[in-house]
Amino acid sequence: MSKRVVCWRHGQTRWNVEHRFQGHTDIPLDESGVAQAARAASLLASLKPSMLVASDLRRAYDTAASLSRLTGLEINVDKDLRERSGGDWEGLTSQEIKERWPKEYAIWTIPNGEPAMTVAVRVAEAIRRWADRLDDDGVLVVVSHGAAIRFGLAHLLGLPEELWHALGGLSNCSWSVVQEGRSGWRLMEHNAGTLPEPVRSDDIAAQTDEG
């Protein structure tokens, strides 16, 4: 069996509910997010993961902690798994962004924000780096953020940037699974685990709560 990587988005935060762009802002899980993490962790534990790594932002780390408690795995922390920096948009709602930056909003160009390709490269490289430590049949759980996971997976799978939209957003505490094969990585599951949950996710213009 080949190496597998489970890319798990953190649980819900208050800013997710308010459709605020989170980015690098260190927002905690809300009560629903804590419950989501516990429920999802009980499912992921059945995969018998062999390694656990999380973004250093508390919403991701605390989500990872729910799985750590069940499995006894140490939580490794990697800043390269952080969400996309939202620049001038962090903390603002989608409506506020649309009103203040209508042109930028229309083409999703974030003033003073992190370019999508930069996010994709750093997240994909982090996934590869940790996956290289696995045994051939190991399972790595990566706990990160909506846009970070989507961009990183797209890059890992070799998709050109103009096709990244083909990967839909991730609901809070849902995950995607990739498996390493002879010719590279392939997508086995996407946005799995907590459906039907509303997708309050990454960089979709109508839902701007990146994080």
Image (cartoon, grey):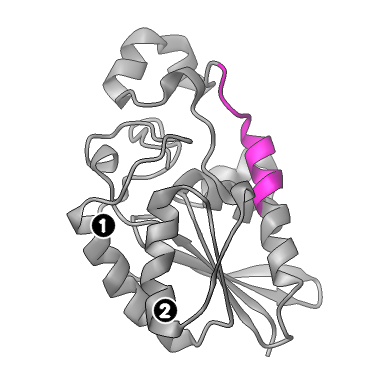
Residue 62, position in %: x, y? 38, 59
**Residue at horizontal 28 percent and vertical 34 percent from the top:** 19
| Amino acid type indicated by mark 1 | Gly
Residue 38, position in %: x, y? 29, 71
Residue 196 makes an appearance in the image? no
Residue that carries the numbered disc 1 in the rendered image: 33
Gap in angstroms between the C-alphas marked 1 and 2 = 16 Å
Instruction: Pick out the residue farthest to the left.
Output: 31
184 shown above or below 126? below
Q: What is the magenta segment's predominant secondary structure? A: helix
Highlighted range, magenta: 112-123
**Residue at horizontal 18 percent and vertical 55 percent from the top:** 31
**Residue at horizontal 42 percent and vertical 38 percent from the top:** 210
Q: Is residue 180 left or right of residue 199?
A: right
Q: Label 1: how many residues lie within 10 Å, few (<14), some (14-19) or many (20+)?
A: many
Residue 200, position in %: x, y? 31, 45
Of 75 and 138, nearer the camera is: 75
| Amino acid type indicated by mark 2 | Leu
Numbered circles on residues, count: 2
**Residue at horizontal 28 percent and vertical 46 percent from the top:** 13
N-terminal-most mark, 1 or 2: 1
Q: Is residue 86 left or right of residue 51?
A: left
Residue that carries the numbered disc 2 in the rendered image: 44
Q: Quadrant of the N terminus?
A: bottom right
Q: Is residue 153 magenta?
A: no
Question: In terms of image quadrants, where is residue 114?
Answer: top right
Instruction: Pick out the residue farthest to the right.
Output: 182
Mark 1 secondary-structure assignment:
helix
210 shown above or below 97? below
